[in-house]
Image (cartoon, rainbow, N blue to C red):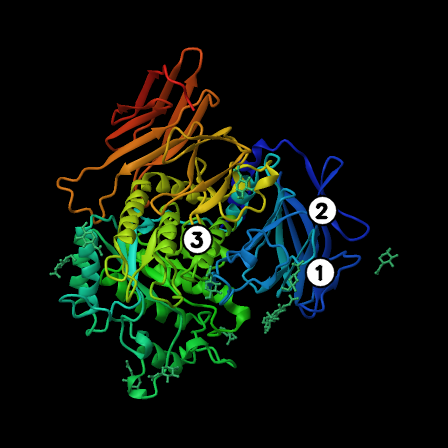
Amino acid sequence: MVVGSRLLSLGALATTALSEYTISLTEQDSLIIRDGDEILVNNLVLLAGKQNTTVQPLKNVTQGLSYNFITPTVAEVKLTTSSPFHGAIFTANQDAHFYGVWEYPFNNQIANKNVSFDLKGVGSNTGLNWANARAPFFLTSTGYGVYTDTLKMGSYDFTVPGKAQFIFNTTSLVYYIILPTTKNDFKSVIEQYTELSARSEMPPTSGLGPTFWSDDFEQDFHGSVSNAQENIQDVVDHLYYNQIRATSTFADRPYGTGNRSWGNFDFDPDFYPDPERFIKNLTEWGFDFQVWIANRATANKDTSLNTKLWNASTENGWLFPLTDEPLGALGPALNLTIPDAYDYFQENLEYFPRVGAKGYKIDRGEENEMPDYLQNEQMALFLQLAYDSMVQKWGASNFYNFARSAVDRSRAVTHIWNGDSHANFTGLAYSVASGIRSGLIAFPIWGSDTGGYTREGGALSPTEEVWARWMWFSAFSPVYELMLGTNHTPWYPPYTNQTLNVLKTTANLHADLVPYIKSYAYAASQTGLPIIRALFLEAPTDPNTWEVNDAYFFGEELLVAPIVNEGGKRSVYFPKGRSKKYINFFKRREVHTAGTTVNVSLDVDSMPVYITQGAIIPRGDIYQGNAKWIEDWQSFLTIEVFPSWDVPESTFTYFTGDGAKGKPAKIKMTTNKEKGTVRVEYENLAVEAAVLIWAWEGSREVNLNRGGGFTEVGIGDTLF
Ligand SMILES: *[C@@H]1O[C@H](CO)[C@@H](O)[C@H](O)[C@H]1NC(C)=O
Ligand SMILES: *[C@@H]1O[C@H](CO)[C@@H](O)[C@H](O)[C@H]1NC(C)=O
Ligand SMILES: *[C@@H]1O[C@H](CO)[C@@H](O)[C@H](O)[C@H]1NC(C)=O
Ligand SMILES: *[C@@H]1O[C@H](CO)[C@@H](O)[C@H](O)[C@H]1NC(C)=O
Ligand SMILES: *[C@@H]1O[C@H](CO)[C@@H](O)[C@H](O)[C@H]1NC(C)=O
Ligand SMILES: *[C@@H]1O[C@H](CO)[C@@H](O)[C@H](O)[C@H]1NC(C)=O
Ligand SMILES: *[C@@H]1O[C@H](CO)[C@@H](O)[C@H](O)[C@H]1NC(C)=O
Ligand SMILES: *[C@@H]1O[C@H](CO)[C@@H](O)[C@H](O)[C@H]1NC(C)=O
Ligand SMILES: *[C@@H]1O[C@H](CO)[C@@H](O)[C@H](O)[C@H]1NC(C)=O
Ligand SMILES: *[C@@H]1O[C@H](CO)[C@@H](O)[C@H](O)[C@H]1NC(C)=O
Ligand SMILES: *[C@@H]1O[C@H](CO)[C@@H](O)[C@H](O)[C@H]1NC(C)=O
């Protein structure tokens, strides 16, 4: 990114700033940001030292420190001395909350209370193993964010109330203190942060799911199935006959030859006799196909069986020399800083797009296969080369890569799944919290293994109840992906029709919400704003929202409160944000007032979801995917609107296309209480569409013009 253009666009963002912020160094060597007389940011101490454990406050800094506002709301601090480690301490009031840095929800919390950890993969932990997305960025409830612009290893410490500390392994540290463009606008902090680091690429619609996969397609055969290829077709066929919507599938390992099926950049002919024809057939049936990859090279006891990747790496000295045995005896990673190693890997990966694969599931990166202090730099390189190998074949936004271990700059080249969740309610609860946290570090396109990955024993793992609740959560996640396979395939015993029915309802609901979800994915690519939003992002002045780890806004219009405990009961708090009332998504005469709490009790056939007043929600069948059972399929968009006299005007930007192809189309709704009218204006939606106007008495449908226009109706009914 060119510095000039960065300044320019950030400046454009900040034009609405009402304040005149100033930064200064105090006599006590603290950096202070003031708005008039009020101290907004106290960067109490700058740190430097020989080791991360011995850093000391810098005193009387005359050289090596610079600080200034590069836009009205972003201060840049640069610190360079001869010390190898640098850091900073920020202080705030004792009860301030600090968010961000890690996707993993330590202690099932969305804030970082009492957390101290490195900026690296989190490993196996309660609820989730390897929920590893991370960013050198924290956001505080006091109203600002701090972004440290580096791929070097560092650590963050939030163990002292009211204090945030970071230390990085670098002689030269650059960080940005980011203030909101208007008071309490945390979203503007995230926008400015992602402008400085990276924003996610618009995914293809097929990437948003529903996606069905397995890591044991080479076993668990049913009926006439005799190999992995036919096993995937068996999944395709069951989805078809049950009329369950899907858009993609992928082969987790094992699928190739070589020790543990990886290293020859191929498909094992025993599993996949004809990969190219197989993938082509999948495409015809409406599925994109991805394959598993990792930056690891594995040896064999019988050296004649060593893989291409191992041979090339050892002959050229590309492997990291390791002191610890990597997890799973799966061999060391290649040092991708070596240009030849990087090029070799990319060139060999190109086999997969050549035979039709449209993306990768990118595994590992934090299992001792490389020195920890290089995790951020090395994973950034691997994710980049994986992206490059795909983009040259398909073009930007036409394939779907997703990883579990990614640092923030990589969000431009990969999406995220939250690692190996546990297949029980703990795993579900932690997955919901990690989804919220993923949003707070601005990784917008995110999903979890529906039902969990790590089996917990017992006849049913997950239980039917856990799986159903998780399916509902995935319906309201950016990505709906579900692992099936040995003893956990919804249409095979021991599971019953209850699970199959919930799968069908939720997968089809997710598909129906795709117009809404992809519009937010587009917004994320333009603004950096996440789709899963912590409640405080939409209700920043409601103190009851700071710690909520089990409810979120899905975009601006939907409040989602997944049930993450056994028994189907939970309480739902309605935040005091823009909306004064919330309408039950499934029972549209049930309305709740902001600031109240309700206890709900629901069977597995529903979940608590609520709509804000004035909401505009585009939904409907705009991407066919596998729905070949529908004869003469045609796309149709339904724009549901929920007008309220409390909301004179609301807007929604609908994204008209798939991936990079498409345009933003603005939809605007205005209400006029005196005239008793609701007016909906819309730009070219590029699809047959109708608007469904909801009032207390029910809904009214009006067809819309193809090229854009408006419709105005008189409403005799009571509005929400
Ligand atoms: C120092 O670095 C080591 C190695 O990365 C890490 O384990 C430790 O947490 C760091 N300590 C501090 C205080 O940052
Ligand atoms: C910092 O500078 C001041 C004034 O120049 C001096 O009095 C003080 O001793 C210095 N402190 C340190 C720690 O060097
Ligand atoms: C903070 O975490 C440490 C170590 O994880 C634990 O021993 C301590 O009890 C925690 N303190 C609080 C106040 O939660
Ligand atoms: C193509 O895929 C469909 C759906 O899975 C399957 O029924 C059919 O047998 C496949 N055709 C070939 C030639 O593999
Ligand atoms: C696979 O590779 C690992 C690590 O290089 C090695 O320890 C193991 O023995 C190999 N397995 C076989 C079956 O060769
Ligand atoms: C790797 O090298 C060994 C000899 O060290 C050879 O036997 C084997 O065929 C090579 N593997 C590949 C895939 O080329
Ligand atoms: C990785 O490769 C680079 C470039 O050759 C080299 O400078 C660096 O020392 C290597 N790192 C390790 C840990 O071997
Ligand atoms: C800091 O980085 C250097 C390489 O620049 C590495 O050798 C060292 O182990 C790292 N220290 C820590 C604590 O990670
Ligand atoms: C989920 O499984 C883990 C063990 O993997 C266990 O510690 C935890 O208590 C379980 N949670 C529930 C709600 O059963
Ligand atoms: C599920 O329902 C179908 C018909 O809707 C029925 O044929 C099938 O036997 C049922 N399966 C189970 C496991 O109950
Ligand atoms: C919800 O349930 C809790 C616990 O049973 C109870 O204390 C609370 O009063 C209930 N709240 C409402 C609004 O009914």
In the image, which is nearer the foreground, mark 3 or mark 1? Answer: 3
In the image, which is nearer the foreground, mark 3 or mark 2? Answer: 3
Q: Amino acid at mark 3?
A: Glu
Q: Nearer the viewer, residue 259 or 698?
A: 698
| Label 3: how many Cα within 10 Å (few below 14, some 14–19, many 20+) | few
What is the x, y in percent for residue 155? Answer: 61, 63
Q: Residue at x 36, y 79 (%)?
A: 310
Q: Which residue is mark 1?
A: 47
Whole-number angstrom distance, CA of label 2 to CA of label 1: 21 Å
Q: Is residue 240 visible?
A: yes
Q: Nearer the viewer, residue 293 or 13?
A: 293
Task: Judge: label 3 CB < 8 Å from ligand 9.
Answer: yes
In the image, which is nearer the foreground, mark 2 or mark 1? Answer: 2
Q: Residue at x 23, y 53 (%)?
A: 287
Q: Amino acid at mark 2?
A: Asn
What is the x, y in percent for residue 554? Answer: 43, 41
Q: Amino acid at mark 1?
A: Leu
Q: Which residue is mark 3?
A: 566
Task: Judge: label 1 CB < 8 Å from ligand 1.
Answer: no
Instruction: Return the residue found at the far top.
Output: 675
